[in-house]
Amino acid sequence: MTRRGFLGVTAAAAGAAATGWIGGAHLLGPGLPGLLLPSRLPLPRPYQVPLPIPPVLDPVRHEAGTDFYEITQRVAELDIIPGVRTPAWTYGGSFPGPTIVARSGRRAVVRHRNELPEPTVVHLHGGHTPADSDGYPMDLLLPTGDAGGASHAGHGAGGLARGSREYTYPHEQRGATLWYHDHRHGVTGYAVWQGLAGFHLVHDEEEDALGLPADDHDIPLMIVDRSFGADGSFLYPRADARPHSHGVAAPYMNGVLGDVILVNGAPWPVMPVEATRYRFRLLNASNARRYRLELDPQPPGGGGLVQIGSDGGLLPGPIAHDALDVSPAERFDVVVDFSRYRPGTRIRLVNRLGSGSTADVMCFDVTGPAGESRPLPERLAQGPALDPGRAVATRTFHFQLRPDHGWSINGRPYEPGQVLARPRLGTTEVWRLISDFHHPVHIHLDPFQVLSRDNRAPGRFDAGWKDTIDLHPSQAAEIAVRFTDHPGTYMIHCHNLEHEDMAMMADFITE
Ligand code: C2O
Ligand code: CU
């Protein structure tokens, strides 16, 4: 398609939105990023509990080049809201699940055992993973003791498993902040809301050489919103109250929003910090909520959140932000230098897109003695390398609400096995992503680079390698992507989990 054709498509998308074909959603409040589900218990006061750090998972054994891990998925009762207990679906008994810490080039094999009441699927988000371990939404891991397996289908390369199965992660990829979460067809929103999410970090030598904050100064922060029932349980408006039901109740199809913000599973926690630099791996693991994160107060001179990495690892150089827009599934690796504040200062991490209880996220208390600011290295990592001028194909994907069948890509609701694209391994392609609404679009297997938004330069949060792009309403973005190494079936989908479950997902096959 020519530039001019592309402009035509953009205008068509914008025009359609203006004339209201997304009006099929009028009852949902067009443009609203989701519907708030109020908790049925008194909300706790913010800044009362310490920030938890998810446990790091020890391998059960090593072999040359491979670490073996085991995770049991089970219901556990968590202490989240004072005075009540929250039964959660967990990886290994905690929410977030245990953090897997891996090395680039070193293989991990993770055996998952499912002791939950329903089937699951594990996806390593951001992983450069062979198709049979990628967590295709139909490749169910049935619970131990599930006798009705014959009624389920395992459509992907991974097939169907009962009780337990192994996922293999070669880690032939750069150091980056990845995360793992459930990916079952039609039920991802419910399963993740119930607690199935954890960090998976990959380190590499390029990062080691930089002297970035490490160990207890390298902190993953998983930010989610949740709502609670009067008994402390996670509230979620499943389409149908019976177990195994797919999707979300119609009023919530734009997305489910909670009124309690959890960071690493704790409501509005507090973290005491020394007056020095910390690295924070920010992950928005919310189903549908977008955040604009900002430190309040800003340090003198502003630019308190210094971004060093994106979804796909370190940036070429640091970028100082006053605020960060983070859509579901995006990761921003930032360094905060608390020596820019006086000891004794309380700094809130706030959400400028929230209101009331969702305007607060967590806070940091700077402890003495005063420290000294040190600049970060000006160069962090090798620059992004894809050349869109060498693209061998251009494809267009429309992310739209269709009055006839809900959220769709190129007019089709998700149907396992229906293939939308067949990119060739090792070649660069340009993909045009066109939206009617906010859609955080995620692509499996390999990261991409944002080339443009609405024919203008990429936005301030688009730097580096991305695997999720925060598409704005009526927007057309271009990305360059190159798939490598692994032939098979992968996914492109919206990471608003209610949109995903309500069919805004498609298969593509690399060959
Ligand atoms: Cu984080 Cu296909 O998902
Ligand atoms: Cu969406």
Image (cartoon, rainbow, N blue to C red):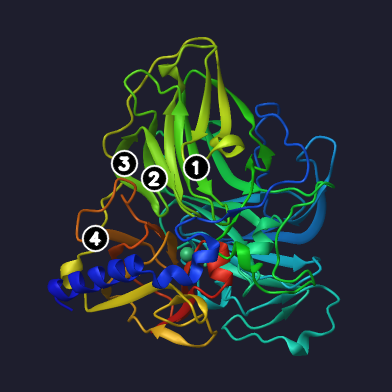
Q: CA distance from mark 2 to mark 3?
A: 9 Å
Q: Is mark 1 in CB contact (under 8 Å) with mark 2?
A: yes
Task: Name the amino acid type tagged 3.
Answer: Leu
The residue pinned by badge 1 equals: 281
Earlier in the chain: of badge 2 and badge 3, it is 2
Marks 1/2: CA–CA distance: 9 Å
Relative depth, front residue between 5 and 49: 5
**Residue that numbered label 2 is attached to:** 309
Q: Nearer the viewer, mark 1 or mark 4?
A: 4
The mark that comes first in sequence, 3 or 1, is 1
Q: Which residue is mark 4?
A: 454
Circle 4: element type: loop
Tell me if residue 85 comes above or below residue 435 in the rendering.
above
Q: Are marks 2 and 3 in contact (CB under 8 Å)?
A: yes
Left or right of 434, for residue 47: right
Q: In the depicted view, which residue is nearer to us: 508 or 401?
A: 401
Q: Nearer the viewer, mark 3 or mark 1?
A: 1
Near mark 4 (Cα within 10 A), the count class, few <14, some 14-19 or many ≥20, is some
Cα gap from disc 3 to disc 1, whole angstroms: 16 Å
* Residue type marked 4: Asp
Distance between the Cα atoms at labels 1 and 4?
A: 29 Å
Q: Neighbour class for label 2 at 10 Å: few (<14), some, many (≥20)? A: many
